[in-house]
Image (spheres, rainbow, N blue to C red):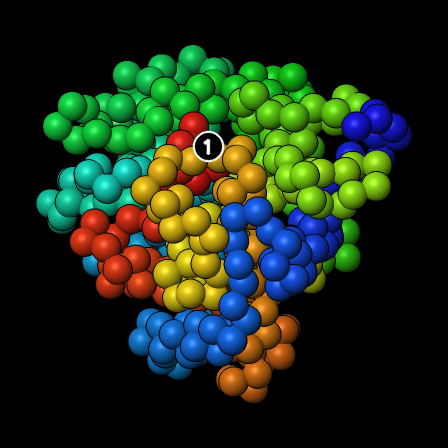
Amino acid sequence: MPLLDPEAFRALLKPAAIRARAHEMLELGLAGRLLHFGVLPGRLEACADYVLDTIRANYPTLDIPFHARWRHFVVGGEDRWKRLDRAAGFRDAGERGRAAYDLAVVSVLLDAGAGPDWRYRDPLSGEAIGRSEGLALASLDMFAAGLFSSDPAKPLRADAMALKRLDSAALARGFQAGAQNPLLAVEGRSALLNRLGEELERQGLSRPGELFDRFVAAADTGTIRAAHMLSEVLATFGGIWPSRLTLAGVPLGDTWRHPLIAQGEPAEGLVPFHKLSQWLTYSLIEPLQWAGIAVIDIDDMTGLPEYRNGGLFLDLGVIALKDEADRGRVHEVSSPLVVEWRALTVALLDEVGALVRKRLGRSREELPLAKVLEGGTWAAGRRIAREKRVDGGPPLTIISDGTVF
């Protein structure tokens, strides 16, 4: 592939490119031209019904929050972030916002698949909590204990100095992980936080929370666009991802190759997702809202191509493997099969979102995709996984470095 104008590759850092190439993958699937999956559009209506049942069970009044990390800090009906917020007595909205951003960035970057056997025992309730909720609570407790701060007098922060020095043993202790409680990719998680600290320093930032101040400054009319937030997140944290593509000097992060996509274009064969960066951006919206900033055009961003949303479509038969033996194989995240699965997930989330809105008589403004995800497809993916498999795990086995799935 010729290395042309860097702008051709920078375009892959925008949500419009994620959506366009995902829908190109869906069109290939509908035409029967994909390498690994077929698409059965007749199953979409049943999938939407299943998602609607899940929404009504979880949010009977349809008062659905955004799909964000803040949901995972609620344990047994108590919002642990709000508990910490009250105890901290932050001086003003800026101090609260910077602390919230520090926590959100670190917690989201630690939120990759934990594996079926790991649990975090909540020191307050004694409950053993797994998966995303357990990872969230553990990260919140580590944050409250000052693990990510280099200043013992200011524990409620994450700063570059502490992050770049954090070792995997300290992180494992914080997660209560060990031989009897195995957590996937502890080293990958700690290495990611190390690179976060180094990248912050390279960019002249002392902590992730300074991004909050940037967004407040950019919202000179009291509003800011979600796509602008994502572009800033990608620009600020783009250098932290391991062993990824850099083309024409542009680090492409969560972007992968597929031979059938965008043929003949300058960025031929490249499929962007930016799953963690979008998940992070969704999670950075609420602290701005708490400070009185309106975030607009949230639906410009896409659904998240991870194994809960992806599993929903595979488990409900909206997509089907061409070779059923692939269920028993282990797949690299860079494989064409996984790239197809993730791209189809992004496109089909748009389709299901539209069906759900139609059934409920809601507009995109009233029920943006971020709420459909929360209400929603992510919870429905977890629900069908538990119905299909004893351990509630994903339908496919992916080799992850702790930064994608």
Q: Position of residue 288 (x, y in %)?
A: 58, 52
Q: Is residue 169 above or below residue 317?
A: above
**What residue appears at the point 47 percent right and 53 percent down from the top-left corner?**
322
Mark 1 element type: strand
Q: Is 341 positioned to the left or the right of 123 in the image?
A: right
Q: Position of residue 63 (x, y in %)?
A: 44, 75
**What residue appears at the point 28 percent right and 38 percent down from the top-left corner?**
115
Q: Is residue 32 above or below residue 264?
A: below
Residue nearest the viewer, comparing 291 with 313: 313
**Image quarter in which the N terminus is found:** top right
Q: Is residue 250 visible?
A: yes
Q: Is 308 positioned to the left or the right of 119 in the image?
A: right
Q: How many marks?
A: 1
Q: Quadrant of residue 7?
A: top right
**What residue appears at the point 21 percent right and 46 percent down from the top-left corner?**
129
Q: Position of residue 13 (x, y in %)?
A: 71, 40
Q: Is residue 185 above or below residue 335?
A: above
Residue nearest the viewer, comparing 295 with 146: 295
Q: Quadrant of residue 291?
A: bottom right
Residue nearest the viewer, comparing 51 with 161: 51
Q: Amino acid at mark 1?
A: Glu
Residue nearest the viewer, comparing 31 with 219: 31
Q: Position of residue 69 (x, y in %)?
A: 43, 49
Instruction: Decide: few, some or many residues near mark 1? Use Cα within 10 Å; few <14, some 14-19, many ≥20.
Output: some
Residue position for label 1: 332
Q: Is residue 94 visible?
A: no
Q: Is 243 positioned to the left or the right of 319 in the image?
A: right
**What residue appears at the point 39 percent right and 17 percent down from the top-left corner?**
166
